[in-house]
Protein backbone atom coordinates (compact mmCIF):
# COMPACT_ATOMS: atom_id res chain seq x y z
CA UNK A 1 0.00 0.00 0.00
CA UNK A 2 2.67 2.44 -1.03
CA UNK A 3 1.55 4.46 -4.08
CA UNK A 4 5.09 5.61 -4.87
CA UNK A 5 6.39 2.05 -4.81
CA UNK A 6 3.49 1.00 -7.05
CA UNK A 7 4.33 3.82 -9.45
CA UNK A 8 8.00 2.78 -9.48
CA UNK A 9 7.06 -0.86 -10.14
CA UNK A 10 4.69 0.15 -12.97
CA UNK A 11 7.39 2.24 -14.64
CA UNK A 12 10.05 -0.45 -14.21
CA UNK A 13 7.67 -3.04 -15.63
CA UNK A 14 7.19 -0.91 -18.74
CA UNK A 15 10.98 -0.75 -19.20
CA UNK A 16 11.15 -4.51 -18.69
CA UNK A 17 8.44 -5.07 -21.31
CA UNK A 18 10.28 -2.98 -23.90
CA UNK A 19 13.52 -4.87 -23.20
CA UNK A 20 11.69 -8.22 -23.38
CA UNK A 21 10.34 -7.23 -26.81
CA UNK A 22 13.90 -6.39 -27.90
CA UNK A 23 14.99 -9.83 -26.64
CA UNK A 24 12.34 -11.50 -28.82
CA UNK A 25 13.63 -9.58 -31.85
CA UNK A 26 17.22 -10.47 -31.03
CA UNK A 27 16.35 -14.15 -30.52
CA UNK A 28 14.55 -14.18 -33.85
CA UNK A 29 17.51 -12.45 -35.50
CA UNK A 30 19.85 -15.26 -34.45
CA UNK A 31 17.45 -18.14 -35.14
CA UNK A 32 14.84 -17.66 -37.88
CA UNK A 33 15.25 -14.21 -39.47
CA UNK A 34 16.30 -14.27 -43.14
CA UNK A 35 19.77 -12.66 -43.51
CA UNK A 36 18.56 -9.59 -45.35
CA UNK A 37 16.28 -8.65 -42.45
CA UNK A 38 19.38 -7.61 -40.48
CA UNK A 39 19.44 -3.91 -41.30
CA UNK A 40 15.83 -3.16 -40.38
CA UNK A 41 16.07 -5.54 -37.43
CA UNK A 42 18.91 -3.45 -36.06
CA UNK A 43 16.66 -0.38 -36.33
CA UNK A 44 13.74 -2.13 -34.61
CA UNK A 45 15.91 -3.15 -31.68
CA UNK A 46 17.51 0.29 -31.51
CA UNK A 47 14.07 1.95 -31.38
CA UNK A 48 12.97 -0.30 -28.51
CA UNK A 49 16.25 0.36 -26.72
CA UNK A 50 15.81 4.12 -27.17
CA UNK A 51 12.30 3.92 -25.69
CA UNK A 52 13.42 1.66 -22.83
CA UNK A 53 16.38 3.87 -22.05
CA UNK A 54 14.23 7.02 -22.08
CA UNK A 55 11.58 5.42 -19.86
CA UNK A 56 14.18 4.15 -17.39
CA UNK A 57 16.19 7.36 -17.17
CA UNK A 58 13.07 9.56 -16.86
CA UNK A 59 13.63 12.08 -14.07
CA UNK A 60 10.40 10.80 -12.46
CA UNK A 61 12.16 7.52 -11.66
CA UNK A 62 15.00 9.41 -10.00
CA UNK A 63 12.49 11.36 -7.91
CA UNK A 64 10.60 8.19 -6.93
CA UNK A 65 13.87 6.50 -5.92
CA UNK A 66 14.79 9.54 -3.78
CA UNK A 67 11.34 9.63 -2.19
CA UNK A 68 11.44 5.88 -1.47
CA UNK A 69 14.96 5.84 0.01
CA UNK A 70 13.70 6.35 3.62
CA UNK A 71 11.38 3.35 3.11
CA UNK A 72 14.35 1.28 1.90
CA UNK A 73 16.48 2.44 4.83
CA UNK A 74 13.79 1.32 7.30
CA UNK A 75 13.99 -2.30 6.04
CA UNK A 76 16.63 -5.04 6.22
CA UNK A 77 18.75 -4.98 3.02
CA UNK A 78 17.44 -8.37 1.80
CA UNK A 79 13.80 -7.23 2.02
CA UNK A 80 12.36 -7.25 -1.53
CA UNK A 81 11.41 -3.54 -1.36
CA UNK A 82 14.85 -2.50 -0.08
CA UNK A 83 16.56 -4.69 -2.69
CA UNK A 84 14.37 -3.34 -5.48
CA UNK A 85 15.11 0.27 -4.58
CA UNK A 86 18.84 -0.43 -4.15
CA UNK A 87 19.26 -2.33 -7.43
CA UNK A 88 17.02 0.02 -9.43
CA UNK A 89 19.00 2.99 -8.10
CA UNK A 90 22.29 1.36 -9.02
CA UNK A 91 21.09 0.74 -12.59
CA UNK A 92 19.46 4.16 -12.79
CA UNK A 93 22.57 6.05 -11.71
CA UNK A 94 24.61 4.12 -14.27
CA UNK A 95 22.19 4.58 -17.18
CA UNK A 96 21.10 8.16 -16.52
CA UNK A 97 24.61 9.29 -17.49
CA UNK A 98 24.29 7.66 -20.92
CA UNK A 99 22.42 9.79 -23.51
CA UNK A 100 19.45 7.99 -25.11
CA UNK A 101 20.81 8.56 -28.63
CA UNK A 102 24.09 6.96 -27.64
CA UNK A 103 22.33 3.92 -26.17
CA UNK A 104 20.34 3.50 -29.39
CA UNK A 105 23.44 3.97 -31.54
CA UNK A 106 25.19 1.25 -29.56
CA UNK A 107 22.29 -1.16 -30.18
CA UNK A 108 22.10 -0.31 -33.85
CA UNK A 109 25.84 -0.74 -34.24
CA UNK A 110 25.68 -4.08 -32.40
CA UNK A 111 23.07 -5.40 -34.84
CA UNK A 112 25.09 -4.17 -37.85
CA UNK A 113 28.33 -5.66 -36.54
CA UNK A 114 26.62 -9.00 -35.87
CA UNK A 115 25.42 -9.01 -39.49
CA UNK A 116 28.97 -8.24 -40.67
CA UNK A 117 30.48 -10.93 -38.42
CA UNK A 118 28.06 -13.65 -39.51
CA UNK A 119 29.33 -13.15 -43.08
CA UNK A 120 32.99 -12.46 -42.28
CA UNK A 121 33.63 -15.50 -40.10
CA UNK A 122 32.91 -18.24 -42.68
CA UNK A 123 34.72 -16.10 -45.29
CA UNK A 124 37.75 -15.79 -42.96
CA UNK A 125 37.64 -12.06 -43.68
CA UNK A 126 38.90 -10.01 -40.73
CA UNK A 127 39.46 -7.00 -43.02
CA UNK A 128 35.69 -6.84 -43.59
CA UNK A 129 34.94 -6.42 -39.88
CA UNK A 130 38.00 -4.38 -38.93
CA UNK A 131 36.33 -0.94 -39.36
CA UNK A 132 33.24 -2.25 -37.54
CA UNK A 133 35.37 -3.44 -34.64
CA UNK A 134 37.27 -0.14 -34.53
CA UNK A 135 33.94 1.63 -34.19
CA UNK A 136 32.88 -0.84 -31.47
CA UNK A 137 36.06 -0.10 -29.56
CA UNK A 138 35.47 3.61 -29.89
CA UNK A 139 31.87 3.27 -28.67
CA UNK A 140 33.02 1.03 -25.80
CA UNK A 141 35.47 3.68 -24.61
CA UNK A 142 32.78 6.34 -24.88
CA UNK A 143 30.38 4.19 -22.86
CA UNK A 144 33.06 3.73 -20.22
CA UNK A 145 33.74 7.46 -20.10
CA UNK A 146 30.17 8.17 -18.99
CA UNK A 147 31.19 6.73 -15.61
CA UNK A 148 33.45 9.19 -13.78
CA UNK A 149 36.52 8.21 -11.79
CA UNK A 150 36.99 4.69 -13.14
CA UNK A 151 40.44 3.30 -12.29
CA UNK A 152 40.64 1.38 -15.56
CA UNK A 153 38.70 2.11 -18.75
CA UNK A 154 37.40 -1.49 -18.60
CA UNK A 155 35.99 -1.15 -15.08
CA UNK A 156 32.61 0.43 -15.99
CA UNK A 157 32.18 -2.16 -18.77
CA UNK A 158 33.00 -5.02 -16.40
CA UNK A 159 30.66 -3.54 -13.80
CA UNK A 160 27.74 -3.77 -16.24
CA UNK A 161 28.15 -7.54 -16.43
CA UNK A 162 29.71 -8.42 -13.09
CA UNK A 163 28.57 -5.66 -10.75
CA UNK A 164 31.16 -4.56 -8.23
CA UNK A 165 34.12 -6.27 -9.87
CA UNK A 166 37.15 -4.47 -11.33
CA UNK A 167 39.92 -5.19 -13.83
CA UNK A 168 42.60 -5.24 -11.13
CA UNK A 169 40.68 -7.61 -8.84
CA UNK A 170 39.94 -9.98 -11.74
CA UNK A 171 43.51 -9.78 -13.07
CA UNK A 172 44.79 -10.87 -9.65
CA UNK A 173 42.42 -13.88 -9.51
CA UNK A 174 43.31 -14.82 -13.06
CA UNK A 175 47.06 -14.57 -12.41
CA UNK A 176 46.73 -17.02 -9.52
CA UNK A 177 44.59 -19.38 -11.60
CA UNK A 178 47.03 -19.32 -14.50
CA UNK A 179 49.99 -19.99 -12.21
CA UNK A 180 48.30 -23.14 -10.89
CA UNK A 181 46.62 -24.28 -14.12
CA UNK A 182 49.63 -24.30 -16.43
CA UNK A 183 51.64 -26.84 -14.36
CA UNK A 184 48.57 -29.13 -14.17
CA UNK A 185 48.14 -28.92 -17.93
CA UNK A 186 51.83 -29.76 -18.42
CA UNK A 187 51.49 -32.87 -16.23
CA UNK A 188 48.39 -33.98 -18.14
CA UNK A 189 50.14 -33.44 -21.49
CA UNK A 190 53.14 -35.41 -20.27
CA UNK A 191 50.90 -38.29 -19.10
CA UNK A 192 48.88 -38.41 -22.37
CA UNK A 193 47.25 -41.68 -23.30
CA UNK A 194 43.64 -40.60 -23.83
CA UNK A 195 41.67 -39.47 -26.85
CA UNK A 196 38.09 -38.58 -27.74
CA UNK A 197 37.60 -40.92 -30.70
CA UNK A 198 34.61 -42.55 -28.95
CA UNK A 199 32.60 -39.34 -29.32
CA UNK A 200 33.98 -38.34 -32.74
CA UNK A 201 31.94 -40.65 -34.90
CA UNK A 202 28.85 -40.12 -36.98
CA UNK A 203 25.92 -39.37 -34.66
CA UNK A 204 22.70 -38.51 -36.58
CA UNK A 205 21.51 -35.12 -35.41
CA UNK A 206 17.86 -36.05 -34.85
CA UNK A 207 18.91 -38.74 -32.35
CA UNK A 208 21.31 -36.27 -30.70
CA UNK A 209 18.38 -33.88 -30.28
CA UNK A 210 16.16 -36.57 -28.74
CA UNK A 211 18.82 -37.53 -26.23
CA UNK A 212 19.61 -33.91 -25.30
CA UNK A 213 15.91 -33.17 -24.75
CA UNK A 214 15.70 -36.17 -22.45
CA UNK A 215 18.71 -34.93 -20.46
CA UNK A 216 17.50 -31.33 -20.10
CA UNK A 217 14.07 -32.62 -19.03
CA UNK A 218 15.86 -34.71 -16.38
CA UNK A 219 17.62 -31.52 -15.26
CA UNK A 220 14.18 -30.01 -14.67
CA UNK A 221 13.85 -27.84 -17.79
CA UNK A 222 10.13 -27.32 -18.36
CA UNK A 223 9.18 -27.39 -22.06
CA UNK A 224 5.94 -25.60 -21.15
CA UNK A 225 8.09 -22.65 -20.00
CA UNK A 226 10.84 -22.74 -22.60
CA UNK A 227 12.01 -24.03 -25.95
CA UNK A 228 15.20 -25.03 -27.77
CA UNK A 229 16.20 -23.75 -31.22
CA UNK A 230 19.30 -23.72 -33.42
CA UNK A 231 21.77 -20.88 -33.82
CA UNK A 232 25.38 -20.17 -34.83
CA UNK A 233 26.53 -19.20 -31.34
CA UNK A 234 24.47 -20.78 -28.54
CA UNK A 235 22.91 -18.55 -25.88
CA UNK A 236 19.92 -18.34 -23.56
CA UNK A 237 17.49 -15.45 -23.40
CA UNK A 238 14.52 -14.70 -21.15
CA UNK A 239 11.27 -13.09 -22.31
CA UNK A 240 9.37 -13.65 -19.05
CA UNK A 241 9.58 -15.71 -15.89
CA UNK A 242 7.63 -18.45 -17.72
CA UNK A 243 9.27 -18.10 -21.14
CA UNK A 244 12.99 -18.75 -21.59
CA UNK A 245 14.69 -19.67 -24.87
CA UNK A 246 17.73 -21.87 -25.29
CA UNK A 247 19.66 -21.92 -28.54
CA UNK A 248 22.15 -24.64 -29.46
CA UNK A 249 24.15 -25.98 -32.37
CA UNK A 250 24.92 -29.54 -33.39
CA UNK A 251 27.77 -31.37 -35.12
CA UNK A 252 26.93 -34.77 -36.61
CA UNK A 253 30.54 -35.85 -36.22
CA UNK A 254 30.98 -34.86 -32.57
CA UNK A 255 28.62 -35.94 -29.82
CA UNK A 256 29.81 -33.33 -27.30
CA UNK A 257 28.74 -30.21 -29.21
CA UNK A 258 24.96 -30.46 -29.00
CA UNK A 259 24.61 -32.32 -25.72
CA UNK A 260 26.91 -30.13 -23.65
CA UNK A 261 25.76 -26.87 -25.22
CA UNK A 262 22.17 -27.92 -24.43
CA UNK A 263 23.09 -28.74 -20.81
CA UNK A 264 25.01 -25.49 -20.55
CA UNK A 265 22.21 -23.29 -21.85
CA UNK A 266 19.63 -25.27 -19.87
CA UNK A 267 21.68 -24.46 -16.77
CA UNK A 268 21.30 -20.76 -17.56
CA UNK A 269 17.58 -21.35 -18.15
CA UNK A 270 17.08 -23.15 -14.82
CA UNK A 271 18.56 -20.14 -13.05
CA UNK A 272 16.12 -17.77 -14.79
CA UNK A 273 13.16 -20.12 -14.28
CA UNK A 274 14.05 -20.40 -10.60
CA UNK A 275 13.98 -16.66 -9.82
CA UNK A 276 11.12 -15.78 -7.46
CA UNK A 277 8.22 -14.91 -9.84
CA UNK A 278 7.31 -11.86 -7.72
CA UNK A 279 10.44 -10.21 -9.20
CA UNK A 280 9.08 -10.51 -12.78
CA UNK A 281 9.15 -7.18 -14.58
CA UNK A 282 11.56 -5.59 -12.10
CA UNK A 283 15.36 -5.26 -12.18
CA UNK A 284 15.51 -8.04 -9.53
CA UNK A 285 14.12 -10.64 -11.95
CA UNK A 286 17.47 -11.70 -13.39
CA UNK A 287 20.67 -13.50 -12.40
CA UNK A 288 23.06 -11.76 -9.99
CA UNK A 289 25.82 -11.30 -12.58
CA UNK A 290 27.35 -12.82 -15.70
CA UNK A 291 29.77 -14.80 -13.56
CA UNK A 292 27.00 -16.10 -11.31
CA UNK A 293 24.93 -17.04 -14.34
CA UNK A 294 27.85 -18.79 -15.95
CA UNK A 295 28.56 -20.65 -12.72
CA UNK A 296 25.18 -22.34 -13.09
CA UNK A 297 25.51 -23.23 -16.77
CA UNK A 298 28.96 -24.64 -16.06
CA UNK A 299 27.83 -26.47 -12.93
CA UNK A 300 25.22 -28.37 -14.93
CA UNK A 301 27.48 -28.85 -17.94
CA UNK A 302 30.67 -29.88 -16.14
CA UNK A 303 29.93 -30.99 -12.60
CA UNK A 304 26.83 -32.95 -13.64
CA UNK A 305 27.18 -33.55 -17.40
CA UNK A 306 30.89 -34.33 -17.53
CA UNK A 307 30.85 -36.15 -14.20
CA UNK A 308 31.27 -39.89 -13.78
CA UNK A 309 28.24 -40.16 -11.45
CA UNK A 310 25.83 -38.86 -14.07
CA UNK A 311 27.01 -41.31 -16.72
CA UNK A 312 26.92 -44.28 -14.34
CA UNK A 313 23.17 -43.80 -14.62
CA UNK A 314 22.76 -42.42 -18.14
CA UNK A 315 25.32 -44.19 -20.30
CA UNK A 316 23.06 -47.20 -20.97
CA UNK A 317 20.42 -44.79 -22.36
CA UNK A 318 23.01 -43.14 -24.58
CA UNK A 319 24.18 -46.55 -25.82
CA UNK A 320 20.56 -47.47 -26.58
CA UNK A 321 20.23 -44.23 -28.59
CA UNK A 322 23.45 -44.91 -30.53
CA UNK A 323 23.90 -48.72 -30.54
CA UNK A 324 26.13 -48.76 -33.64
CA UNK A 325 28.41 -46.00 -32.41
CA UNK A 326 28.59 -46.73 -28.68
CA UNK A 327 27.10 -50.20 -28.13
CA UNK A 328 30.50 -51.80 -27.55
CA UNK A 329 32.23 -48.79 -25.97
CA UNK A 330 32.70 -49.25 -22.20
CA UNK A 331 31.98 -46.36 -19.81
CA UNK A 332 35.68 -46.50 -18.90
CA UNK A 333 36.46 -45.33 -22.44
CA UNK A 334 33.53 -42.93 -22.80
CA UNK A 335 34.21 -41.00 -19.59
CA UNK A 336 37.83 -40.06 -20.51
CA UNK A 337 36.63 -39.26 -24.05
CA UNK A 338 34.18 -36.59 -22.83
CA UNK A 339 36.94 -35.26 -20.57
CA UNK A 340 39.75 -35.37 -23.10
CA UNK A 341 42.23 -32.59 -22.39
CA UNK A 342 43.83 -31.07 -25.44
CA UNK A 343 44.93 -27.50 -26.08
CA UNK A 344 42.84 -26.42 -29.04
CA UNK A 345 41.80 -23.36 -31.04
CA UNK A 346 38.14 -22.94 -30.11
CA UNK A 347 37.05 -21.70 -26.69
CA UNK A 348 33.56 -23.20 -26.79
CA UNK A 349 34.96 -26.65 -27.61
CA UNK A 350 37.66 -26.49 -24.95
CA UNK A 351 37.94 -28.99 -22.11
CA UNK A 352 37.62 -27.95 -18.47
CA UNK A 353 41.38 -27.66 -17.96
CA UNK A 354 42.29 -25.47 -20.93
CA UNK A 355 39.02 -23.49 -21.12
CA UNK A 356 40.10 -20.74 -18.78
CA UNK A 357 43.31 -20.13 -20.72
CA UNK A 358 41.13 -19.19 -23.70
CA UNK A 359 39.11 -16.80 -21.55
CA UNK A 360 42.03 -15.18 -19.76
CA UNK A 361 43.85 -14.31 -22.99
CA UNK A 362 40.69 -12.66 -24.35
CA UNK A 363 40.35 -10.67 -21.13
CA UNK A 364 43.96 -9.49 -21.43
CA UNK A 365 43.50 -8.53 -25.10
CA UNK A 366 40.34 -6.58 -24.23
CA UNK A 367 42.19 -4.59 -21.59
CA UNK A 368 44.98 -3.86 -24.06
CA UNK A 369 42.55 -2.77 -26.79
CA UNK A 370 40.68 -0.52 -24.37
CA UNK A 371 43.68 1.18 -22.82
CA UNK A 372 45.35 1.67 -26.22
CA UNK A 373 48.26 -0.76 -25.91
CA UNK A 374 46.85 -2.77 -28.82
CA UNK A 375 45.34 -1.53 -32.11
CA UNK A 376 42.51 -3.40 -33.83
CA UNK A 377 44.67 -3.89 -36.93
CA UNK A 378 47.23 -5.77 -34.81
CA UNK A 379 44.62 -7.90 -33.05
CA UNK A 380 44.73 -11.00 -35.31
CA UNK A 381 48.51 -11.21 -34.86
CA UNK A 382 48.30 -10.60 -31.10
CA UNK A 383 45.66 -13.34 -30.93
CA UNK A 384 47.88 -15.79 -32.80
CA UNK A 385 50.86 -14.97 -30.59
CA UNK A 386 48.84 -15.60 -27.40
CA UNK A 387 47.52 -18.94 -28.68
CA UNK A 388 51.07 -20.01 -29.40
CA UNK A 389 52.43 -18.85 -26.04
CA UNK A 390 49.47 -19.85 -23.83
CA UNK A 391 48.12 -22.98 -25.48
CA UNK A 392 50.92 -24.05 -27.81
CA UNK A 393 48.65 -24.08 -30.86
CA UNK A 394 48.66 -21.70 -33.81
CA UNK A 395 45.38 -20.70 -35.48
CA UNK A 396 45.74 -21.38 -39.22
CA UNK A 397 43.29 -18.56 -40.02
CA UNK A 398 41.14 -15.85 -38.42
CA UNK A 399 37.96 -17.89 -38.76
CA UNK A 400 39.15 -20.17 -35.97
CA UNK A 401 41.19 -17.35 -34.47
CA UNK A 402 40.07 -13.86 -33.64
CA UNK A 403 36.71 -14.19 -35.45
CA UNK A 404 35.47 -17.21 -33.50
CA UNK A 405 33.55 -15.45 -30.73
CA UNK A 406 30.47 -13.33 -31.31
CA UNK A 407 31.05 -11.09 -28.27
CA UNK A 408 33.17 -8.32 -29.78
CA UNK A 409 30.75 -8.30 -32.72
CA UNK A 410 27.54 -8.03 -30.78
CA UNK A 411 28.11 -5.61 -27.94
CA UNK A 412 31.10 -3.85 -26.46
CA UNK A 413 34.77 -4.67 -26.29
CA UNK A 414 35.22 -5.09 -22.55
CA UNK A 415 33.16 -6.87 -19.93
CA UNK A 416 32.10 -9.88 -21.97
CA UNK A 417 34.70 -12.51 -21.16
CA UNK A 418 35.69 -12.39 -17.50
CA UNK A 419 32.32 -13.86 -16.49
CA UNK A 420 33.21 -17.20 -18.08
CA UNK A 421 36.17 -17.80 -15.82
CA UNK A 422 34.53 -16.22 -12.77
CA UNK A 423 31.70 -18.65 -13.51
CA UNK A 424 34.05 -21.63 -13.52
CA UNK A 425 35.57 -20.56 -10.21
CA UNK A 426 32.12 -20.07 -8.64
CA UNK A 427 30.70 -23.30 -10.10
CA UNK A 428 33.37 -25.32 -8.28
CA UNK A 429 32.73 -23.46 -5.03
CA UNK A 430 28.96 -23.88 -5.27
CA UNK A 431 29.11 -27.56 -6.23
CA UNK A 432 31.45 -28.27 -3.31
CA UNK A 433 28.94 -26.51 -1.02
CA UNK A 434 26.08 -28.59 -2.50
CA UNK A 435 28.03 -31.77 -1.79
CA UNK A 436 28.60 -30.70 1.81
CA UNK A 437 24.89 -29.88 2.21
CA UNK A 438 23.67 -33.02 0.42
CA UNK A 439 25.92 -35.92 1.50
CA UNK A 440 24.15 -38.42 -0.80
CA UNK A 441 24.34 -36.14 -3.86
CA UNK A 442 26.66 -38.42 -5.90
CA UNK A 443 24.34 -41.37 -5.30
CA UNK A 444 21.30 -39.28 -6.28
CA UNK A 445 23.00 -38.11 -9.49
CA UNK A 446 23.86 -41.75 -10.31
CA UNK A 447 20.15 -42.62 -9.92
CA UNK A 448 19.18 -39.79 -12.30
CA UNK A 449 17.74 -37.73 -9.45
CA UNK A 450 18.80 -34.20 -10.42
CA UNK A 451 15.77 -32.63 -8.77
CA UNK A 452 17.41 -32.61 -5.34
CA UNK A 453 20.35 -30.60 -6.65
CA UNK A 454 18.02 -28.26 -8.55
CA UNK A 455 15.93 -27.66 -5.41
CA UNK A 456 19.04 -26.84 -3.40
CA UNK A 457 20.30 -24.44 -6.09
CA UNK A 458 16.89 -22.79 -6.38
CA UNK A 459 16.73 -22.31 -2.65
CA UNK A 460 20.35 -21.18 -2.23
CA UNK A 461 20.79 -19.05 -5.34
CA UNK A 462 18.14 -18.90 -8.07
CA UNK A 463 15.14 -17.57 -6.13
CA UNK A 464 17.10 -14.50 -4.97
CA UNK A 465 17.45 -12.99 -8.45
CA UNK A 466 19.53 -9.82 -8.03
CA UNK A 467 18.76 -9.30 -4.32
CA UNK A 468 22.38 -10.19 -3.52
CA UNK A 469 25.53 -9.51 -5.55
CA UNK A 470 27.58 -12.45 -6.81
CA UNK A 471 30.20 -11.84 -4.11
CA UNK A 472 27.49 -11.82 -1.41
CA UNK A 473 25.83 -14.97 -2.76
CA UNK A 474 29.12 -16.88 -2.95
CA UNK A 475 29.93 -15.85 0.62
CA UNK A 476 26.44 -16.86 1.84
CA UNK A 477 26.33 -20.18 0.01
CA UNK A 478 29.95 -21.34 0.34
CA UNK A 479 31.22 -19.43 3.38
CA UNK A 480 34.17 -18.05 1.39
CA UNK A 481 34.90 -15.24 -1.10
CA UNK A 482 35.29 -15.96 -4.83
CA UNK A 483 38.61 -17.77 -5.19
CA UNK A 484 40.70 -20.28 -7.10
CA UNK A 485 41.06 -23.15 -4.60
CA UNK A 486 37.81 -25.05 -5.24
CA UNK A 487 38.28 -25.17 -9.01
CA UNK A 488 41.92 -26.23 -8.76
CA UNK A 489 41.01 -28.88 -6.19
CA UNK A 490 38.31 -30.23 -8.52
CA UNK A 491 40.53 -30.20 -11.61
CA UNK A 492 43.52 -31.78 -9.83
CA UNK A 493 41.38 -34.57 -8.39
CA UNK A 494 39.30 -35.33 -11.45
CA UNK A 495 42.07 -35.16 -14.04
CA UNK A 496 44.61 -36.71 -11.69
CA UNK A 497 42.36 -39.75 -11.67
CA UNK A 498 41.62 -39.77 -15.41
CA UNK A 499 45.26 -39.27 -16.40
CA UNK A 500 46.80 -41.34 -13.60
CA UNK A 501 48.78 -38.43 -12.13
CA UNK A 502 50.09 -38.87 -8.59
ZN1 LIG B 1 27.02 -19.56 -20.70
Image (cartoon, rainbow, N blue to C red):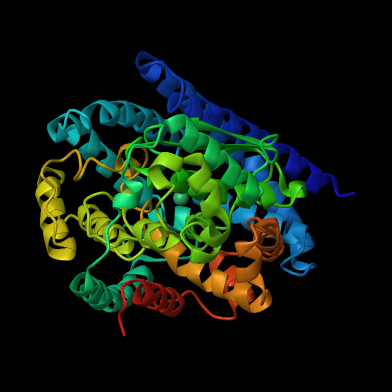
Residue 148 visible at all: no
Q: Which is more toward the observer, 121 or 54?
A: 121
Residue at 65% from the left image edge and 32% from the top image edge: 17
Where 223 falls versus 177 (above or below)? Answer: above
Q: Is 112 drawn above or below residue 95 in the view shown? A: above
Relative placement, left or right, of 171 versus 87 is: left
Residue drawn at 24 percent across, 73 percent down: 182
Lateral position of residue 48 relative to residue 217, left or right: left
* Outermost residue toward the bottom in this view: 502
Instruction: Tell me if residue 155 comes above or below residue 62 in the rendering.
Output: below
The image quarter in which residue 12 lies: top right
Q: Measured from the top left, where is residue 459 in percent x and y?
A: 72, 63
State the quadrant of the C terminus: bottom left
User: Residue at left 57%, top 46%?
Assistant: 215
Expressed as whole percent of the image width and height from the top left, the position of residue 258 reads: 43, 41
Residue at image location 77% in from the left, 48% down from the top: 278
Q: Is residue 119 visible?
A: yes
Q: Is residue 169 left or right of residue 164?
A: left
Amino acid sequence: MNPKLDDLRRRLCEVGDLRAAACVLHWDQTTYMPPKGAVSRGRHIATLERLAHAAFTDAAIGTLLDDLQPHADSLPPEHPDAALIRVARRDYERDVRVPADFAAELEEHAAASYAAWIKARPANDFAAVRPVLERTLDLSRQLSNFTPNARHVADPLIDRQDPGMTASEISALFAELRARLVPLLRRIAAAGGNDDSAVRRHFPISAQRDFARRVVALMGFDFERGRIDDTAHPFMTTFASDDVRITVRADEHFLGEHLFSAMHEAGHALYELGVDPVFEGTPLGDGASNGMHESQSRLWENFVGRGRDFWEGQFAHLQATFPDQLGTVPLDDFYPAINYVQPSLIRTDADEVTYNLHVMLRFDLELQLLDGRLAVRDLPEAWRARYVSDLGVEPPDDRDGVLQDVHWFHGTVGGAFQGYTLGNLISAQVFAAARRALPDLPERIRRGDLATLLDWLRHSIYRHGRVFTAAELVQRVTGAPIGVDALMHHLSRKYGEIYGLD
